[in-house]
Image (tube, helix red, strand yellow):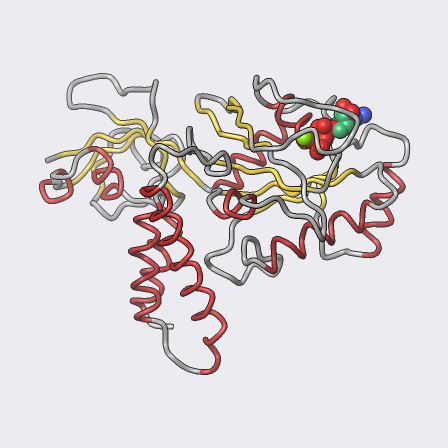
């Protein structure tokens, strides 16, 4: 791969909007070395680009007509739950957010996506509850809900006798459509977590042990809606791979209320783009509190920021 390709791949990973993703993909496609070894990746990139184009066309076309499977993003990131019927998706969203989603001990209670905002420290992360799927029944539109996400939570019922089948059905469906990639080689695949729910129920421990023996490659996190939510919140935040940056105007206190959300690895220059269109040209340097060696240290435009840094842009 060429430096131009890696540069574009980096941009794709940092992209927070469909437009930014499409721009980066165009460059990835034009700079990827064209030979046999990259054919699969080339195809995957082209497919992703055409999906994004199609989705953005549909959104403009459908202004006015409502598509329940297109979930508007809110907060620091959109995390979509995916799983077989009755695995506990709605219960988990209800526990982690204040959303009033329907939870019931029979399958197919959820027919369209529903959202809730999960508080995490000083930000909110959007969780999206979805209707279930099985190997031979996938609700129309659901795949595009997954594709549009920033990350996926794959949910299975650890207490169920068919727990392994559930996980295999889920992974197969998501992998076949390039939404996730368990081998983590596809740059356009989404980050995901495998959650085994109902860990409090009697068969869960034994099932988990069997699962781990049969599929040592899968890292399944056992959880229950009765657990403390903090560790899972932390995992979900980490999964999104974002950082919070607080901005500070010269001579004023930093605005600690509303952090900018950027992808990990973002620089001072990336913050400048968010603040104002004209800023990047004018930007000379920045002062950083937090990750810098000294409080208020002057750093160059290319300085890579860390979560919770405070930045004062100097023009
Ligand atoms: N004991 C226990 N029951 C759970 C847990 N999560 C979900 N449930 C129950 O499992 C059933 C199905 O949950 P629901 O959220 O509707 O599943 P969905 O179809 O995946 O949305 C409900 O009766 C829930 O109360 C859990 O962690 N522990
Ligand atoms: Mg449900």
Figure check: 219 above or below 157: below
Q: How far across and down, in percent of the image, does residue 10 sit?
A: 36, 56
Q: In which quarter of the image is the N terminus?
A: bottom left
Q: How far across and down, in percent of the image, does residue 86 sit?
A: 75, 34
Q: Which quadrant would residue 63 be assigned to in this image?
A: top left
Asked whether, in this view, residue 297 is left or right of residue 164, the answer is left
Q: Which residue is drawn at 17% across and 34% down?
A: 276
Nearest the viewer among 78 and 254 is 78
Asked whether, in this view, residue 68 is left or right of residue 5, the answer is right
Q: Residue furthest front?
A: 65
Figure check: 103 above or below 20: above
Q: Which quadrant would residue 95 be assigned to in this image?
A: top right
Q: Quadrant of the C terminus?
A: top left
Asked whether, in this view, residue 69 is left or right of residue 279, the answer is right
Ligand 2: image quarter: top right
Q: Which residue is drawn at 69% across and 40% down?
A: 155
Q: How far across and down, in percent of the image, does residue 79 sit?
A: 53, 37
Q: Which residue lies furthest to the bottom in this view?
A: 36
Q: How far across and down, in percent of the image, does residue 48 sit?
A: 43, 58
Q: Which quadrant would residue 214 be assigned to in this image?
A: bottom right
Nearest the viewer among 55 and 9 is 55
Figure check: 311 above or below 207: above
């Amino acid at each position: 791969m060429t430096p131009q390709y890696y540069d574009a791949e980096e941009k794709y990973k940092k992209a927070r909007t469909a437009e930014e993703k499409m721009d980066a993909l165009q460059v990835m496609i034009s700079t990827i070395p064209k030979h046999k070894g990259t054919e699969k990746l080339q195809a995957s990139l082209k497919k992703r680009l055409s999906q994004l184009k199609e989705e953005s066309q549909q959104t403009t076309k459908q202004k006015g007509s409502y598509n329940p499977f297109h979930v508007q993003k809110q907060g620091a990131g959109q995390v979509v739950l995916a799983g077989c019927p009755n695995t506990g998706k709605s219960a988990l969203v209800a526990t982690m957010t204040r959303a009033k989603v329907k939870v019931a001990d029979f399958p197919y209670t959820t027919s369209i996506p529903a959202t809730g905002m999960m508080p995490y420290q000083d930000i909110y992360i959007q969780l999206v509850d979805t209707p279930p799927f099985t190997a031979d029944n996938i609700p129309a539109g659901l795949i595009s809900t997954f594709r549009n996400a920033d990350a996926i939570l794959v949910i299975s019922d650890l207490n169920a006798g068919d727990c392994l089948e559930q996980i295999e059905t889920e992974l197969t469906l998501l992998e076949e459509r390039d939404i996730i990639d368990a081998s983590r080689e596809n740059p356009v695949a989404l980050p995901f977590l495998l959650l085994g729910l109902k860990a409090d129920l009697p068969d869960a421990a034994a099932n988990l042990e069997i699962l781990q023996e049969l599929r040592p490659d899968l890292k399944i996190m056992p959880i229950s809606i009765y657990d403390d939510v903090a560790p899972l919140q932390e995992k979900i935040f980490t999964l999104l791979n974002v950082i919070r940056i607080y901005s500070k105007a010269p001579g004023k206190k930093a605005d600690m209320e509303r952090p900018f959300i950027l992808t990990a690895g973002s620089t001072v220059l990336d913050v400048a783009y968010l603040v104002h269109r004209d800023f990047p040209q004018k930007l000379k340097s920045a002062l950083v509190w937090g990750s810098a060696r000294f409080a208020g240290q002057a750093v160059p435009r290319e300085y890579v920021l860390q979560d919770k840094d405070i930045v004062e842009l100097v023009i």
